[in-house]
Image (cartoon, rainbow, N blue to C red):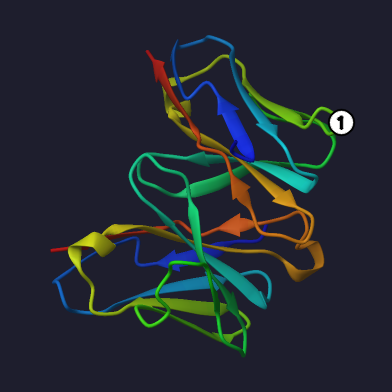
Amino acid sequence: KNEVEQSPQNLTAQEGEFITINCSYSVGISALHWLQQHPGGGIVSLFMLSSGKKKHGRLIATINIQEKHSSLHITASHPRDSAVYICAVLPYGQNFVFGPGTRLSVLP
Amino acid sequence: GAVVSQHPSRVICKSGTSVKIECRSLDFQATTMFWYRQFPKQSLMLMATSNEGSKATYEQGVEKDKFLINHASLTLSTLTVTSAHPEDSSFYICSARPPDRANTEAFFGQGTRLTVV
């Protein structure tokens, strides 16, 4: 069993749709990152979460530490949101453990 | 905010040559940097941890003589792929964490796409 799992693996949405990507993990962590990787490859950290909820523009990320689960929501999705979204957790005193990624395509 | 800069973003080299990739932390001193490799449609895999002023720590299965890491200053780590072969073609990316927030924050370079022909 992978330490970090994501669902769905692939997601195609129409522009304007509300999108949810889920992440579940099995280890205790000090933080969880949601990363965005565009086709060119560069990675941007969208959110760092250790508890609760964060919002940035059309993006919302939540985490439930007790249930070891996090969600990334995109409201009013746009084609430029098309990317791979990676959940990455930081177990205490260790390095990142990455989820397999969710490939999102938003169609105009 | 803190930025990690990686150079070059793309490189094509001939088989048998060596390629150096640089990773710089621009806003903070990074005693530790991390090098990852990513094959197409796969997740990032940690190759090695680069430690300023000492030897890098390599993950199991990563050849230290092939992937030379030098962390000569608190803001610069380099990865040199020696005697590159086509199977070394991949996406390489570095990351660094601000020492005062190492348990939570992390920043990634833009990545380097290496193609060995």
The residue under label 1 is A66
Which residue is at 82% across, 42% downward?
A: A50
Of residue B43 and residue A12, the one placed in the foreground of this image is: B43
Of residue A26 and residue B91, the one placed in the foreground of this image is: A26
Q: Residue A93 placed where, x, y %?
A: 77, 61
Instruction: Say if A32 sits above or below B86 in the image.
Output: above
Instruction: Say if B31 sits above or below A1 in the image.
Output: below
Write down the quadrant of residue B17 in the picture.
Answer: bottom left
Q: Residue B42 placed where, x, y %?
A: 41, 42
Q: Residue B3 placed where, x, y %?
A: 59, 61
Which residue is at 19% across, 63% downward?
A: B86
Write down the quadrant of residue B55 in the picture.
Answer: bottom right
Which residue is at 13% across, 71% downward?
A: B14
The secondary element bearing badge 1 is classed as loop
| Quadrant location, the N terminus of chain A | top right
The chain letter for the residue carrying disc 1 is A
Give, as a three-letter code, the residue at label 1.
Answer: Gln
Instruction: Say if A77 sits above or below B99 in the image.
Output: above
Instruction: Say if A10 sits above or below B83 in the image.
Output: above
Of residue A50 and residue B48, the one placed in the foreground of this image is: B48
Q: Can residue A94 be seen in this view?
A: yes
Which residue is at 50% across, 35% downward?
A: A101
